[in-house]
Amino acid sequence: MIHDALLVAAKDLRLELRSRVAINQVLPFALLVLVLFAFALDPDRGLLEKATPGLYWVAVLFSGLLALQRSFAVESADGNRDALRLSGLDPAGIFLGKVLAVSVQLLVLEALLLAGVAVLYSTHLGGWPLLVSTVVVATAGIAAAGTLYGVVAAGLRVRETLLPLLLLPVLAPVLIGSTRAFEAALAGTPSEGWPWVGLMGVFAVLYVVAGVLGFGPLMEES
Amino acid sequence: MSGSWPYVIAAWIIVIGAFLTYAVVTILRGRSLSKQVPPERRRWS
Amino acid sequence: MTTQIAKGSQGRPADGDDAGPTSTGSTTTRVLGILTLLGFGMLFALAFFITPADANQGDAVRIIYVHVPSATFAYTGCFLTTLGSAIYLWKKSQWWELVAYAGAEIAALFTAVTLVTGMLWGRPTWGVYWVWDARLTSTAMLMLLLLGYLAVRRLPADYSVRAKRAAIVGLLLFPNVIIVRQSVTWWRTLHQTATIGLHTKMNGLMLFSLFFGFVVVGVFFTWLLIHRFRVAWLEEQVLDQGLDAAIAERRAEGSAATSGGASGAGPVVPPNLATGEASP
């Protein structure tokens, strides 16, 4: 299972390195969102800095959605879905591999966005242990839930509109948790943030388990 | 707090209206669909 | 109100004798329907005329008698969806899949009613329609989660595709509701916002009215569930018939031989449906 997961993840990341869709399109989009927030909120009144955690995670969610769409567009082309099914790989492994690949892309995206808010919103970053834990746990949750709902929407004509409807309400706890944890980290009161990391950890575990169990039946269908 | 009466009445109208509309729509759909399905597949009375 | 449903229940037995029922009604639903009508009349009288205004909430308390039961049965429907989805994934029982679908749609109706009545209660009580209270916010999220499930279930695709994908979403529906509720509750309490509850001192008659509200809404919920279940069953039958009859028959043979035909591909009637009441 782990072997299969690494195989699938390596395949997805190699594909990504060659096509550079994430770097050429998703990342600029994420930065665009940051700039749009500055247009929407008056940048001179310190609103941006105050709202950094929320704006940051909303930007991550929206651009993460694009990365997820991409991750399944890759599979739906040329009957890849069937090929993957026939490959004899463990479905749980395929799921974990996709989660891993999406997580890596999200982590890169998040690191660059973090630099983006530090520069553009003049946010003073601090509380690194909590900041990093939040990013890791939230990413795992977003990637696991995103991959599971991504495959529910995959291969349908309405997938572009269906995935956000399915995924964003489900990710509400992650958005709340990561935003609060970031606020706590930036305000220098990390003890308020750790329970949120725990909640997001439960969320991530729930979705990894659901994906490992549910991916088989979902892949079976015609 | 007699000012809350309009809200109370509006709430009840909406509740009854929504429930009734949904119930009627469900029944009517059931009737029109029943006509299209052979009787041996809809025995429940 | 009375005429619409009563007319329907009288029309059924005559033309339903030989050819099977021409509607989704049966003796059980007729009894439940009449109880619902009587119950709502009684509840209305209790809420408007018999019970007094509340000391804190004033007349707005009269909304509570229908608001709280609606909320409870919205969650009940949601739970049925998760239960049905789980059993469908486990046993491949179409019966439970249809229960899950019916439960979700009714839960969406009840959630909408809960939200609207909640806002109309909030306006006179708090002065605003909406506050970011934990209970309100998580109910709104429940609505969105249900809409997601229904969107998948209503996809224009093969039954097996729709049902399986919807079942995965449905299976996660209730866990999601719990985790969203938990996070929203923390979100509000960490900010030391007083959770604005339904603080009230209910006297015996008011408590009875609330209890009676639960019973009435519960009977109505059951009535709807049975009807909606049968409509869903008929919908799948009609869709099946759209296929070429010969192909349908072959498929039925094939799937009966391999998997017991539970995918609903052909005219295989699940045994429960022959006598089928949707008794949850």
Image (cartoon, rainbow, N blue to C red):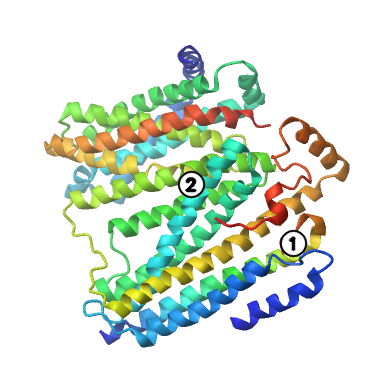
Choose between A97 and C74: the one closer to the eye.
C74
Which mark is drawn over residue A165?
2
Q: Which x, y percent locates residue C249? A: 84, 41
User: Residue at 36% of width from left, 72% of height from top?
Assistant: C210
Q: Which x, y percent locates residue A38? A: 28, 45
Identify the residue under disc 1: B33
Q: Which x, y percent locates residue B10? A: 42, 79
User: Residue at 60% of width from left, 82% of height from top?
Assistant: C2
User: Residue at 60% of width from left, 47% of height from top?
Assistant: C96
User: In the drawing, does residue C179 fall left or right of residue C151?
Assistant: left
As helix, strand or loop, the secondary structure at mark 2 comes to helix
Which mark is drawn over residue A42?
none
Residue type, label 1: Leu
Q: Looking at the image, can residue A28 be seen?
A: no
Q: Give the mark count.
A: 2
- Image-quadrant location for residue B31: bottom right
Choose between A131 and C75: the one closer to the eye.
C75
Disc 2: host chain: A
Choose between C174 and A44: the one closer to the eye.
C174
User: In the drawing, does residue C152 fall left or right of residue B8?
Assistant: right
Answer few, some or many: residues within 10 Å of disc 2's Cα (few below 14, many 20 plus, some between 14 and 19).
some
As helix, strand or loop, the secondary structure at mark 1 comes to helix
Q: Which x, y percent locates residue B41? A: 78, 54
